Image (cartoon, helix red, strand yellow):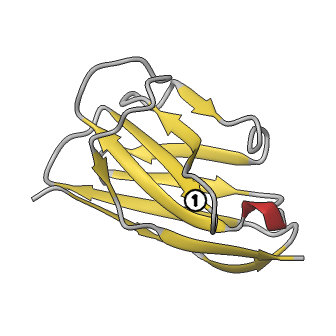
Amino acid sequence: QVQLVESGGGLVQAGGSLRLSCAASGRTFYDMGWFRQAPGQEREFVAAIKWNGVSTLYADSVKGRFTISRDNAKKTVYLQMNSLKPEDTAVYSCAGRTRMTTIQDPRYDYWGRGTQVTVSS
């Protein structure tokens, strides 16, 4: 059974940091991504990483503050979030795909349930 399970969310003050983790099981994923959805808003892309861990992609809103990484031996992808802002508040979900495609491809096949991140001002 394919599962993606996020952890590491919580409440943090503006300017603080959090590290999210996403543990994968059941499949080997080529690309992994992080998305977020704030209340009343559509889900938006945050970051993605190729299977080799070298190629990454970030949304402009998080570039320079967030870092995506992965440990294939542990089947885990991480999102290090620094200099957090209140507008980063959202449910963060990880996603994976088993298709070979470009890192810019927005389509993912498997999704986790998400973890809440709340940034207070």
Residue 95 horizontal/vertical position (percent): 38, 48
Question: Furthest-left residue in view?
Answer: 1
- 7 on left or right of 18: left
Residue 113 horizontal/vertical position (percent): 37, 67
Q: Secondary structure at mark 1?
A: strand
Residue 106 horizontal/vertical position (percent): 45, 31
Q: Residues within 10 Å of mark 1 (few under 14, many from 20)?
A: some
Q: Residue at x 56, y 74 (%)?
A: 116
Q: Nearer the viewer, residue 20 or 89?
A: 89
Residue 121 horizontal/vertical position (percent): 90, 76
- 55 on left or right of 98: right
Question: Furthest-front residue in view?
Answer: 40
Q: Nearer the viewer, residue 37 or 80?
A: 37
- Position of residue 65 relative to residue 57, above or below, is below
- 66 on left or right of 36: right
- Position of residue 121 relative to residue 89, above or below, is below
Determine if residue 108 is in view: yes
Three-letter residue code for mark 1: Gln
- 44 on left or right of 27: right
Q: Which residue is mark 1?
A: 37
- Position of residue 1 relative to residue 97, above or below, is below
Identify the image quadrant of the N terminus: bottom left
Q: Residue at x 83, y 63 (%)?
A: 85
Determine if residue 8 is in view: no
